[in-house]
Amino acid sequence: MRALGWLSILLALVIVAVLVKKQLVATHQGAPSASATAASQAGIELPKVDNAADARRLQDQVKDDVNRMMQDRASQVDHGVGDSDKP
């Protein structure tokens, strides 16, 4: 009788494990994220990042671009370009 109880618990755990695995696989292969969808609708091609080196390179590129834009805007404000945009 006790063996039947353990067997029932084991069977229930196996069923739950299979269902969890199916659910995880289904959620990870779902629709693309909202940002990817918006970018594709705007005609922007997203970069492909396959490994850590690519991810690091892309992060550095974005950081450099943002810093350059901030410096350009700061120099424009210093020179009086776009006075209506000054805070």
Image (cartoon, rainbow, N blue to C red):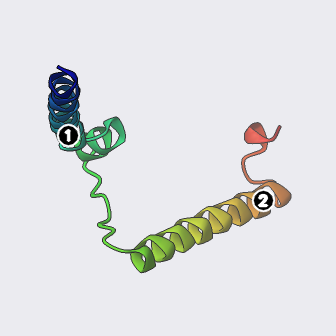
- The relative height of residue 36 versus residue 8 in the rendered view (above or below) is below
Q: Is residue 82 left or right of residue 66?
A: right
The residue nearer to you, when weighing 64 against 36, is 36
x and y percent of residue 66 in the render? 61, 62
Q: Which residue is drawn at 18% across and 25% down?
A: 12
Determine the residue positioned at 48% across, 77% down: 57
Task: Say which residue label 2 marks.
Answer: 74
Specify the quadrant that holds the N terminus.
Answer: top left
Disc 2 packing (10 Å; few <14; some 14–19; many ≥20):
few
User: What kind of residue is marked 2?
Assistant: Ala
Query: Relative to residue 73, is residue 60 drawn left or right?
Result: left
Residue 21: x and y, percent?
20, 40
Look at the numbered disc 2 and give the secondary structure of its residue: helix
Secondary-structure class at tag 1: helix
> Badge 1: few (under 14), some or many (20 or more) residues near its Cα, within 10 Å?
few
Please, is residue 16 above or below residue 80 in the view? above
Looking at the image, which residue is at 24% across and 43% down?
Answer: 28
Res 45 → quadrant: bottom left
User: Which of the two residues, 34 or 76, is positioned nearer the viewer here?
Assistant: 34
Frontmost of labels 2 and 1 is 1
- What percent of the width, then of the height, locates residue 2? 22, 23
Q: Which residue lies furthest to the bottom in this view?
A: 53
Residue at 26% from the left image edge and 39% from the top image edge: 37
Q: Which mark is residue 21?
A: 1
Q: In which quarter of the image is residue 8?
A: top left
Residue most extreme to the front: 1
Residue 55: percent from the left, percent from the top?
Answer: 44, 70
The residues tagged by marks 2 and 1 sit, at their Cα atoms, a distance apart of: 52 Å
Q: Nearer the viewer, residue 60 or 86?
A: 60
Q: What residue type is labelled 1?
A: Lys
Tally the numbered discs: 2
Q: Is residue 35 left or right of residue 74?
A: left
